[in-house]
Image (tube, rainbow, N blue to C red):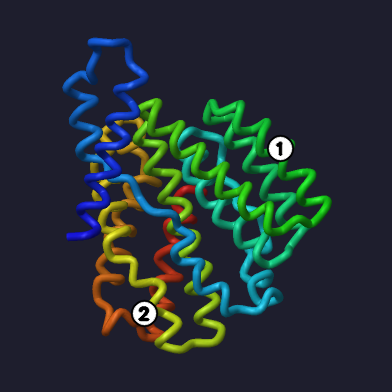
Amino acid sequence: MKTRLIIVTVLILMLFSFACKKKAGQIPDQEMAEQITTFAPLPSFKEVYSTLDQVQVKDIAAAVPATTYKAKQEEVRNAFSLGLLTADAVLATKGRNKSKLSDISAQMMTLTELLGLESEVNRLGDDMKTMIEKEEWDNLDKALDAHKEEVEIKLWESENFDNYTLMLMGGWIEAANRIAWLINQNYSAERTKVLAQKGTFNHLLNNLKQIKTEYIVEQDAFIKAVSTTEELKNLIDHDLDSTYTKEQIAEIIAKTDAIKAAFQE
């Protein structure tokens, strides 16, 4: 009940914010109103990263993918990739991985611009380059949070719910993938509790099924990603007191890897 109340409250606030920006007397049309009530805002993937406080910096650094994620430049893949790379950037910051963070942030700037968010590109570029050089890790973490939040708000306010969903999907899939990978290196049932994000993956799957744009839903990559996300959601639903077996952790890694690979095809 609390989760539903929070979601409804956030939706009301976002609808109010949207309405205030319209001219007096204007209200969203029927299609817009339906989208606002069907697409659910998702929490930050950093909820999964809370477990990193108990992991040594060198181990976190090892969890940053050796190769920066890239897919062909196309809107669906750009949105997914930006979310995924944001998750990797946070991981690289927590792992004090300066060289990887430089590579990731450069790719993020390209993707943000391709999604039509130029002002966010400039802010990210100016702020992060300086912070990376100076190794201002705490400030970098805050800057990434601010950038992520601003991009999400921009996509929502511009009614681009498709890219909003795809970007958040990328962040959550990568966060689950990397944390599952870390847990697999030194498994304990207690550590797996952070992956018991049933509500989030349920809302993510529902959001994906709300996407009706023809050029998106007809793509093999999207079809595979939605199907595998449903399998992942069902897997996460089958916990034992909010914990997962080592075999289930391996499945989470495999399914999130498959979703990432689908968008690279």
Quadrant assignment, res 1: bottom left
Kind of residue indicated by mark 1: Gly
- Answer yes or no: is residue 257 visible: no
Q: Residues within 10 Å of mark 2 (few under 14, many from 20)?
A: some
Q: Is residue 254 left or right of residue 126?
A: left
- Answer yes or no: is residue 148 visible: yes
Q: What's the distance in space between the residues labelled 2 and 1, CA to CA?
A: 39 Å
Kind of residue indicated by mark 2: Gln
Residue 94, horizontal then vertical, whole percent? 65, 65
> Circle 2 sits on which residue?
248
Q: Is residue 30 left or right of residue 124?
A: left
> Considering the numbered disc 1 on the image, is that residue within a helix, a strand or a loop?
helix
Q: Nearer the viewer, mark 2 or mark 1?
A: 1
Marks 2 & 1, CB-CB < 8 Å contact: no
Residue drawn at 50 percent across, 48 percent down = 83
The label on residue 15 is: none
Return the residue nearer the eye: 50 or 76: 50
Residue drawn at 74 percent across, 50 percent down = 102
Q: Residues within 10 Å of mark 1 (few under 14, many from 20)?
A: some
Placement of 174 over or under 182, stated as above or below: above
Placement of 106 over or under 92, stated as above or below: above
Residue 49, horizontal then vertical, whole percent? 51, 66
> Circle 1 sits on which residue?
125
